[in-house]
Amino acid sequence: MIKSLLIANRGEIACRVIRTAQAMGVRTVAVYSDADAKSLHVRMADEAVHIGPSPAAESYLIGEKIIAAAKQTGAEAIHPGYGFLSENAAFAQAVLDADLVWVGPKPASINAMGLKDAAKALMAKAGVPVTPGYMGEDQSDERLKAEADAIGYPVLIKAVAGGGGKGMRKVDAEGDFLASLESCRREARASFGNDVVLIEKFILSPRHIEVQVFGDSHGNVVHLFERDCSLQRRHQKVIEEAPAPGMDPATREAICAAAVKAAQAVDYEGAGTIEFIADASEGLRADRTWFMEMNTRLQVEHPVTEEITGVDLVEWQLRVASGEPIPMKQDELSIQGHAIEVRLYAEDPASGFLPSTGRLDHLSFGAADRVETGVEQGGQVSPFYDPMIAKVICHGATREEAIDDLILSLDDTEVWPVRTNAGFLVRALDAADFRAANLDTGFIARHGDELVPDGVAGEAIWDTAAQIAYDGYDGSELDGFRLNAPGRHSVWLSHRGEARNVDVAATDETDATGYADGDHVIVFAKGVGYSFDTVIRGSGHHSAHDGDIVAPMPGKVIAVDVVEGQQVEEGQRLMVLEAMKMEHALLAPFAGTVTDLSATTGGQVEVESLLARIEPAEEG
């Protein structure tokens, strides 16, 4: 058995591999860039080596640095995780040439599946069903168009070296083919340095079905059943589940047997995934399911397979890489229940899913069965890498139970000030079509805006914010500011430019949660975070500091509505601060006079800096 292991990756997959390796008694070595110096995977590992600047091209993608780190630390083996160099045959060979153990398939197997056209030709020869199309050497415009015309539109043009949705164009009509071909080739050259394409029949109701396979050096290959990864946004997977809904035993047997045949054709060792495209217009059928490609590594969505089989795939990887046979035979593997995984991303669905990076001041996951993450509260979501915060997985006896548990978990997920897609995921999981398993790869695009929360707080959210603000305030300096004190207690709240005076109702009857941070309140409900600015008032007198208007967070002053010496009314807007891509209105806590005005339009301010002061009007 391998005694020491270097993980040539970062984030949640590095943490995932480290946990299993350490449980097996294997010493672990992490590598890290400048941006990851304080990351969770660095602290979890037994040892860590710095390999370069923050950009991946200067650190995680430089194989020589990773191999040098393994040699420096005495690591026996390298696990590539996924992404980065995981499917780089040249790197795999370099690891082997350095007398290290490569935890993955042989370089020849990676090469065999590296180009889509060659892989499809190999699969067709091995008797694996492939999508109707053209993969020939004649790449002239005339030949490609003729083949597309013969297949019948719509067709898909795909770069043979493509991936991640790049180098791919759907063509609906004959007259659009040549322009789409030129665009596809241009993108393929820029992204992969290879503009060779293939033509495939476009499937009108496509389901993305993949089969987990595993091989060893003793000639054994097994499958661990299928996953459905049809819910995608711009060709990127969002929700994955196992087993595939609507998969009957006969179809499962045929597809999984084809996957094993595909792995055997390339003498496969280790964990791999055979991806199929299925025409689900008449349900899942073996004769309408075709090979698409093979991923010669561990997949992001592997936890759902682990949840339904009880297998630790990373443990299997380490055992097989050490020369052991696969720990279980095919007839010992079975499906237990249903598992669903969502990818929790640091992105803002309300702003076109733009990445949201920065410090995770507040981070709390709900009670999911399993959370795979590489970040923690106080850490950073870096702009240099994929913005995934975590994979959240729930397993149930039934699909409906797994859906309900996952929704509850996402309801309780709290992330701030970084925005996430948690609310979007809740809506997708709870959509009637998803619950009914009416799935295909166009699901998200078809449902569109209905899956994106608008971020506008409802009445219950305002009430919760008022209660949180009140409960979180230290009333020792303010006479009469107590829950049981006589008089009316209220909170001025500002949310997205709207200001309200909300009465405080002492009650715990709410589905929302949140926390107060000075004069700032964050409320979470159904996976969405709502930001409020607050000014708290009770029935007593104003203390010396009640009128201090301070910045709730670092930001830019984008509007100043008052001047020095101006008389203002209670709740009147004084200025607007832009921070964390949101506008925050700062309000007068009571009637009085503006003094000590230091804020200027366009000025940058630090957290808790004094921007102005309101001197209370004399009582009389």
Image: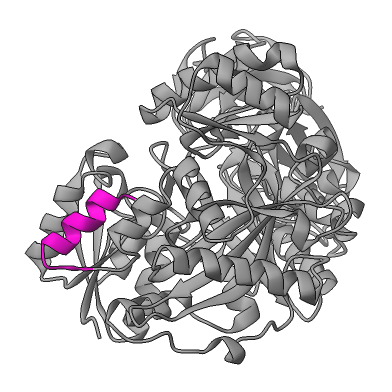
Left or right of 373? Residue 549 is right
Numbered circles on residues, count: 0
Q: Which residues are magenta?
A: 88-101
Residue farthest toward the bottom in the current orientation of the protein: 332
Is 337 positioned to the left or the right of 564 in the image?
A: right
Q: Which of the colour schemes (rainbow, by chain, secondary structure, one colour) is used?
A: one colour
Question: Residue 26 placed where, x, y %?
Answer: 26, 81
Question: Residue shown at 80%/26% (left/top)?
Answer: 498
Q: Going by the image, does 135 lie left or right of 80? A: right
Residue 36 percent coordinates (x, y): 31, 49
Q: Quadrant of the C terminus?
A: top right
Q: Is residue 98 magenta?
A: yes
- In the figure, 604 relative to 492: above or below? above
Location of residue 584 in the rendering, given as x and y in whole percent from the top left corner: 65, 27
- Between 413 and 64, the one lying in front of the other is 64
Q: Residue at x 44, y 60 (%)?
A: 12
The residue lying at 52 percent from left, 40 percent from top is 164
Q: Is residue 309 left or right of residue 203?
A: left
Majority SS type along the magenta span:
helix
Please say whether residue 10 is visible from this viewpoint: no
**Camera sees residue 441:** yes
Q: Is residue 148 magenta?
A: no
Identify whether 581 is placed above or below 118. above
Position of the N terminus, as image quadrant, is bottom left
318 w.r.t. 436: above or below:
below
Q: Position of residue 190 (x, y in %)?
A: 40, 22
Compare residues 326 and 30 and report the one nearer the observer.
326
Q: Nearer the viewer, residue 540 or 377?
A: 377
Which residue: 62% across, 72% down?
257
